[in-house]
Image (cartoon, rainbow, N blue to C red):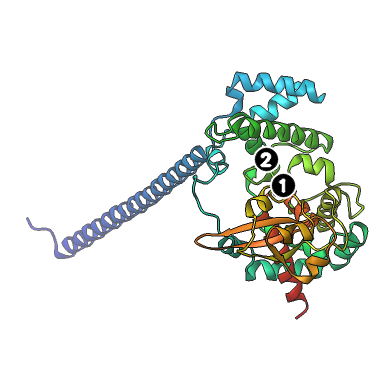
Amino acid sequence: MNPPTTVTRFNQLIAIFLIAAYAHSAGAADQKHSKDAKHSRARAHADAAKRVKHAGHAKRKTDANGPLYATRPEVLKEADAMALRLGLEPQWVRHAIGQSHYMPGIARAIAPPPVGTPKNWTVYRSRFIDPVRIRAGVKFWQDNRETLERAEQQTGVPAAIIVGIVGVETIYGQQIGTYRVMDALTTLAFDFPPEHPRATQRAAFFLSELEAFLTLTHRTHTDPLALRGSYAGAMGLPQFMPSSWNKYAVDFDGDGRIDLFHSAADVIGSVANYFKAFGWTAGMPTHFSVQLVAEGIDKAALLAPDILPTFTAADMAARGGQLDEPALQYTGALALVELQNGDAAPLYLAGTGNFYAITRYNWSSYYALAVIELGQEVAAAMSK
């Protein structure tokens, strides 16, 4: 017997409703599953990317840093001997040296240029005397005018020379170095490249600088592993080596401490004090122009003392050095300074005792002339 039409119709509606409800529930479940799957995939990708990123950082760190010196028994033995020599706590010295890394990049950077590499004053000059340094030098001079004047009054060292030094060294603090000083000094003290022609002497020098650095940081209650500087261990705006900091750095701003990283006054006073200690003479020129005449020249004799002032103006003239009038009137000792220019003719100068004093900051006549000329360029820009 067939059911009544109304009942059948009612049952059909119920069925349709149940099917639709089921379909909606299933779709929602599928959609939720799909979203969860997408979130899971996103998290997986993010986690994978993070792992790759961290692996990349770890790789770069491994590439940059060699092993800790704590793994070198002979170095730790030297650390104990160093502590005894310096009167420092052995465990403190062991920790500082042991937590330092051998830096292969530093060992490469300290190597001398290949034999036969020509020197070129014009190229060298262009590295240090450019619009960036000149603009920064003008600002440094303007910001510290009174301090520069005070330093010049007390030491006789001109503001232009101090400005030239800080500009050549670090562009007035823009490039003070990124190496941990402990890493640099420990690497160069214990693993100085043996192929260097003066490896033994240079390693001994850096060992003494490591001792000076530990003495400095212990005295000032500074974490030796925290300070950063150049690949050679030079620090602050003037790039003082630790021994120079200990001997020549001064508290020029009167705050009771010496800070060559942040105090422009201490930087200025310390650079001036350094030159005063190396015999800077107030009012003395740094150099004169000189021409070598072809007839009667004794260039070998003139260059024999290197850049140490040795000759009177008359002696230099007698050996073929043609000097200008101010140089002929100069009564102090002079040195013939040769700056090569690649394939072009060299530049010759008659350097005074003050030129020699600048080379005590960096033993290079190219460096000294770059300092002088950068200071002159900044001074000229100041007057515009």
Residue 331 in view in this figure: yes
Q: Quadrant of the N terminus?
A: bottom left
Residue farthest along the front direction in this orientation:
296
The residue under the point 84% across, 45% down is 248
Q: How far apart are marks 2 and 1 (CA)?
A: 8 Å
Give the percent coordinates (x, y) of residue 325.
Answer: 78, 71
Percent coordinates x, y for residue 285 in the rendering = 81, 63
Residue 344 place in picture, x, y as percent: 52, 64
Q: Which residue corresponds to the image point at 85% horizontal and 68% vertical from the top-left?
A: 145
Q: Mark 2 falls on what kind of element?
A: helix
Q: Which of 362 and 59 is in front in this view?
A: 362
**For the point 81% across and 68% down, which residue is it?**
143
What amino acid is labelled 1 in the image?
A: Met
* Residue type marked 2: Val
Secondary structure under the numbered disc 1 in the rendered image: loop
Identify the residue position indicated by label 2 in the image. 181
Residue farthest along the left direction in this orientation: 1
Kindly check if marks 2 and 1 are in contact, taking CB atoms under 8 A apart as contact: yes
Q: Is tag 2's residue or tag 1's residue first in the polypeptide sequence? A: 2
Q: Residue 275 carries which label?
A: none
Which image quarter is the C terminus in? bottom right
**Mark 1 lies on residue:** 235
- The reply to whether residue 172 is visible in this rendering is no
**Image coords of residue 204 (percent x, y):** 68, 30
